[in-house]
Structure formats: structure tokens, C-alpha cells
Amino acid sequence: MKKCKLYIASSIDGYIAREDGSLDWLDAVPNPDKLDYGYYAFYESVDTLIMGRKTYEEVLGFGVDWPYPDAKTYIVSSREVEIKTKNTYLINNPLEDKVKEWKRENGKDIWVVGGGVLISSMLDLGLIDEMLLTITPVILGSGIPLFPNNPKETKLELVKTEAFDTGFVNLTYKRV
């Protein structure tokens, strides 16, 4: 059975983006060796992506080619969204049944890309099996929180840590 995995970067104080959605702070930390912090290996392990509308629009605003051309991408939104990328679909009905269906399909795992509201909703529904949090050596002070809307208590087990010379730390948890 496929796993549903959250993979996301966060500031030390728990923000995944600035208040305006900007991710500029991720590139502000010097990375002379051009480390990817496990991103490419992670991306190779998934074939389905789930993200909220604001995250989709933010990625489109990067001004680069769609970075996920080989994955089915589902945009979760209660509003209409103009889909501008191939292999991308809008989901505006209850998510729980869809995710459970995708988990039963053959293939690679499912990546919950973000944003925070979607992450909290999926935690509340018990849909996230693993979390890989990349903690960055930055304090933003304000922004979009990793876990808004006070998600329900969820027990996790730490299964791996990886520290990098840049100050980034990967923490991998599984739901117990």
C-alpha cells in the first residue's frame, strides 16, 4: 500500500512561507556544495502530489517550467482553479475517500506538498503516514505556519535525523 508523506521545509519557529507566500528565505542560507537535502531521492519515491490552491499558484509564480511533469498532481480547493499544467487535476470534494483510494493503487508514494491548511486537514483525517521536515536555520518571526488551525494531537515516532553543514536538519517521523 502506498504511503502518504509530507515533505516540507520549515523555519526554526515553524513557518513554511512568509505571510505573502514567498519562499526567498530558503535560498538565503549559503549552500556552497549545492546540497538538495534529500529532495531528489524523495521525489523519485513518489508519483502523486497533493497541494492546496495557494501552493499551486506560488509554484506557478516561480517563473520556471512545472517542476513535477511526471507526477499526477491534485490541487485541493473549494474554489475553481485555472489548471495550467499537464497531468494536474482539481479536487473540491471530500479528500479522505480520494486519498484512501490512491493509497490502494499500485505505484509509488503520495507527496503532500502543502500548504499548512491542507496539512492540518490531512493530519486531522489521519491521512499522513510519514513526515520529512527540513528545519532551516532561520527564524522568520511571522508567516504561514506549518500547522495552522490547531490540528488534533497526533503521535509520531522519530525514525531518522540528518544534519547538514549548512545548519539544515532533516527529521523523519512516522505516525504511530
Image (tube, helix red, strand yellow):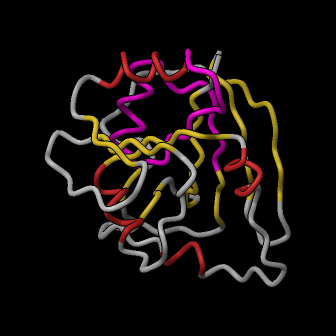
Q: Is residue 131 magenta?
A: yes
x then y, percent, for residue 125: 40, 19
In the image: residue 117, left or right of residue 93: right
x then y, percent, for residue 90: 28, 42
Residue positioned 50% across, 40% down in the render: 112
- Choose between 68 and 173: the one closer to the eye: 68
- Choose between 71 and 167: the one closer to the eye: 71
Residue positioned 71% across, 41% down in the render: 45
Q: Is residue 172 above or below residue 86?
A: above
Highlighted range, magenta: 104-133
Residue positioned 73% across, 63% down in the render: 168
Q: Is residue 118 magenta?
A: yes
x then y, percent, for residue 161: 81, 44
Residue positioned 36% across, 16% down in the render: 97
x then y, percent, for residue 47: 60, 40
- The quadrant in which residue 119 appears is top left
The mark tally for this picture is: 0
Q: Which quadrant holds the N terminus?
A: top right
- The quadrant in which residue 156 appears is top right
